[in-house]
Amino acid sequence: MAAATTRADVMAAHERLRQGPTDFLRSTPLWRLPGAALGLACAEVWLKLEHLQVSGSFKARGMLHRLLAQPIPAAGVVVASGGNAGIATAAAAQALGVHCEVFVPTISSPAKQARLRALGAEVQVVGAAYSEALAACLARQQQTGALLTHAYDQPEVVAGAGTLAREIEEQAGGLPDSLLVSVGGGGLIGGIAAWCEDRCRLVALEPALAPTLFRAREAGAPVDVEVGGVAADSLGAKRIGAISWATTQQHVQTALLLDDDAIRQAQQWLWRELRLAVEPAAALGLAALQRGAYVPRANERVGLVLCGANVDLATLA
C-alpha cells in the first residue's frame, strides 16, 4: 500500500515551491460570502478561486513541485492528462526551460489541447480515455527516459496540491468548518486531507458517472470504474490514486455523488450570478449544496474549491 501524504510533506512542498520561479505560482483569492448570497442557509461560503491559478487550475502546484523535486533529464518531461495536469506540466516546463510532451485522450477538450500547444508542448492524442493515454505515455517514457509527471499519483504532486489548503488557512487565519472537494484521481483531496487532517470536515465529491473514490470506499480498496459525463476530461481517472486512497482513508469522512444536471446547473449559476467562469469539475461543491446532497448547519462556514477554469466558454452561454 502506498504511504499516505502527511502535513510535513505539504509543508516541505511549500518551502520548495518558494524556491522555484518567483513569477509562476499565484496566491489565489479566498472570497468569503454570507451563505444567503448563494441562496444557502449557512453562515458563510468560502470560495477558493483556484481557477485563477497559473495554467487555470490547482494542478500547477503539484506539477511544478514534481519538476523542482527531481532532476530533469535531457529528454525533458512527459505526462498523460485529460488536460489540466498536462497544461500545468507544460506551463511549469516552459517556466523552467525544458521540453514537455503531453498525452491526452480524445475526450480532452479542443480548448485544452490548444492551450497545451500554445505553451509549447508536444501533444499526442491517444485513446478514448485517460487510461489509454497513460499507457502510451508510460511506453514513451521508457523509450526516452523523460521525467514522468503523473497527473495525481506521485508524492510530490499530492503534497504540492496540499499547499492550497495551507494557503486557505493562512489567508483566513484558520480553516472552514467543512471543505467540499472535487475528486478525479484524488491528488487534490489527498493533499488537502494531508494538511487539514481532522481539523475540519472533508467532503469528497464526484460525478455519478466517474465515481472512483466512492466505489473504492464501497469495495474497501481501489477498483477500476467506467467514466464519462460532463466532467470526464478533468475528473476522468478510472481508479483512485494509491496515495490519495491511503490519505483519505485517514481523514475524509464523507464521499458523495452528483449527477451531470446538478453539476452543469451549478457551473452555469456560478457564471450567471457571480461571473465565475469555471469548468464542470469546479462546480461540484456548489452542486452538492444546491441539491441538498450536503446540508450544512446554520452556523457553518463551508469551503468550496473552484479548482479549474479550462472551460469552453461557449458551454456557459
Image: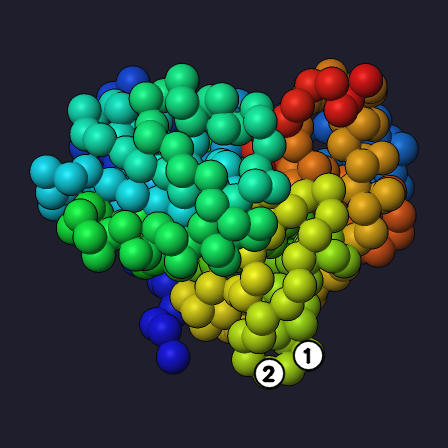
Mark 1 crowdedness (10 Å alpha carbons): few <14, some 14-19, many ≥20: few
Taking depth in this image into account, of 276 and 229 the one nearest to the observer is 229
Image-quadrant location for residue 195: bottom left
Q: Secondary structure at mark 1?
A: helix
Q: Is residue 198 in view?
A: no
Q: Is residue 108 in view?
A: yes
Give how far apart the Cα atoms at labels 1 and 2 are: 6 Å
Task: Please give the name of the residue rendered at 55% of the width and 56% of the height, measured from the top-left corner.
Answer: 237
Amino acid bearing label 2: Gly
Q: Disc number at residue 218? A: 1
Q: Secondary structure at mark 2?
A: loop
Image-quadrant location for residue 198: bottom right
Q: Is residue 140 above or below residue 18?
A: below
Q: Are marks 1 and 2 in contact (CB under 8 Å)?
A: yes
| Quadrant into which the N terminus falls | bottom left
Write down the residue under mark 2: 220
Taking depth in this image into account, of 311 and 251 the one nearest to the observer is 311
Amino acid bearing label 1: Glu
Q: x, y percentage for residue 175?
A: 56, 46
- What count of labels does the image hold? 2
